[in-house]
Amino acid sequence: MADIAAPSSIATMGDRRSSLHKLMQRKSTIAFLMALPLILLILILVAYPAGYAVYLATLNKGMTRFVGFGNFEFLFGRDTFWLVVYQSCLFAITAVIFKAIIGFVVAHFVHNIPSKGQRKWRGMLLVPWVIPPAMSTLAWLWLFDPSYSAINYLLAPLGIDRIPWTGEAGWARFSVILVNVWIGAPFFMIMYLAALKSVPDQLYEAAAIDGATWWQRIWYVTLPMMRNIIAITALFSLIVTFANFDIVRVLTAGGPLNSTHIFGTWAFRVGIEGGDIPLGASVSLFMVPILAVAAAFILRDITKRGSEV
Amino acid sequence: MANTAVADASVRPAYGSMSRDRRWALRWSYFFLVLFAIFFLMPPIYMLITSLKTSQEISAAGNPWWIYNPTLANYAELLTQNHYLIFFRNSAVVSVCVVAVTMLISVIAAFALARMKFWGSATLATGVFMTYLIPETLLFIPLFKMFAWVNDTFGIQLMNHWWTLIILYPTLTVPFCTWIMIGYFASIPKELDEAALIDGATWTQTLTKIFIPVALPGIIAATIFAFTVSWAQFLYPLAFTTSTTELVLPVGIITTLIKGDVFNWGQIMTGALLGAAPPLIIYAFLMDYYIAGLTAGATKG
């Protein structure tokens, strides 16, 4: 069916230009040319820099000498590096778990109410996801302000003393996770809501006839039906949270005393602000293993679903 | 379907109390939804409250959640200030250009990948998706060095220009938009374009006359995605632009309104709120497309 597109080139002209012409008219050639901007973009601005990062990581600070694994050895010997590893994993895992739970619960509540009002609630609850993270984190920074904290003002009548939201290692970590959850939970909510709508009502009716309690219905009907969406949303979110930059940068800039630095922010501090590009590249490369594992799982899910279709 | 009903719903004899259970489940749902809505909307509302206060009131010891002397002074001051308008213009120009470039590249490429199979097209489709998973935090340092190399070799200074962002942002938007569009295009029945080809349409005509109109919801969703991503991007402008005339909004607000340790919170909140306005307005009017774009990445394909 496809070659109908190139009927004019069938004419046998005999000269060299016509074979080139014919090649240009071939469907696969046209298709390749159409995809070429995409291919070039990916190669030049994504694939090449990714490979270049590996090369950069093997140079010395002045980028004049090859040092092999020198940068990595240096990093392994530094406490800050292990702190960054610990914090990146801590933030990503905790935040994703809470995002998933809150998203699931909120999606259920929205799903419960009459469908007439669902649109309105869904619209309101997605707002944190829509605001650019750098801007909403500024609002959190102001809510957490050491002297004028509006949250502490609300907590004061409950007998809770001033909380140093961004001033103390433990609380600063908590704040970073809280803001992450605040921004990410609505995304989970939307994904789960879409998945909830696709669970057939008959399954719930059958479960109700069998005398299932509400949590049995969730455990044996809802969760298995949504397993795929839950997995892929969590993996996406894990990647995004793990590789996050905006929130930590604006909220704490890594402080106090590096206790909230993650790979992205520390690589920026070391590589751009500290002027040690190879070391910064080495730091950011440590994100690759975890990203690769998450990406492999997502890819497996996608190819699986692709073959089902 | 009161699956979140309170626990005693199962204890009580189910007969006859069904509607009452359901009513309670509904009440609880509303109660918790209100709680969550308060949590989710607290920061933007507090932005609005702060933006309407004078600096004296902000630093006073009163109730921070109440405005005693509402004023628009922060807005007036910010919108007459040159810097802020430049940031806004830079952001707008960059975002619009990025959206245009993104849609051009991704719609055409998605059409080729979804319909006109060529050698390696399946691998490329997967590869496009993988690129979406590579975060910008991994790429900014090698890009930084590459730009220095471009400057040394060709004499083109890419650093510290807002238009550099137009080159960079498509790496964040194109993969996902292509991915969405492949999904939408693949869902168009093959009979449709076969009919067009039989009628003598060229590939270009098939694309513009059939695929783009039919997949318009997908295109709108992808456009919104591209716009919000480029409007919100923070790391690249922070790493690659420094002069106040070259900054875009998110970085501009943070670097110019915060002077040393002096936080002019009234203006910062006003700036952040105005900066958040374009995505919010688009979202308010095109919510369904916005959500379609969000869920497309994981449910399609």
Image (cartoon, grey):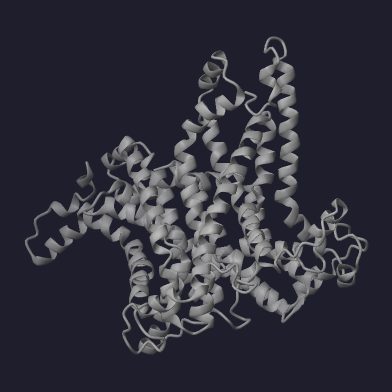
- Give the left or right position of residue A215, taking residue B209 as reference: right
Image-based side of B70 in relation to A136, left or right: right
Quarter holding residue B25:
top right
As displayed, is residue A118 above or below residue B137? above
Q: Quick check: A13 left or right of A214? A: left
Q: List x then y, in percent, for residue A20.
A: 15, 63
| Up/down of A251 relative to B219, above or below | below
Q: Where is residue B126 in the image (x, y as percent from the top left)?
A: 33, 52
Quarter of the image where the N terminus of chain A is located: top left
Report the residue at 76% width, 67% height from top. A145
Q: Quadrant of residue A9?
A: bottom left
**Residue B216 seen anywhere in this rendered image of the structure:** no
Nearest the viewer among A76 and B72 is A76
Number of numbered callouts drawn: 0
Residue B299 location (% of width, % of height): 45, 41
Left or right? Give the position of A262 relative to B101: right
Image location (x, y in percent) of residue B2: 65, 24
Q: Nearer the viewer, residue B8 or B120?
A: B8
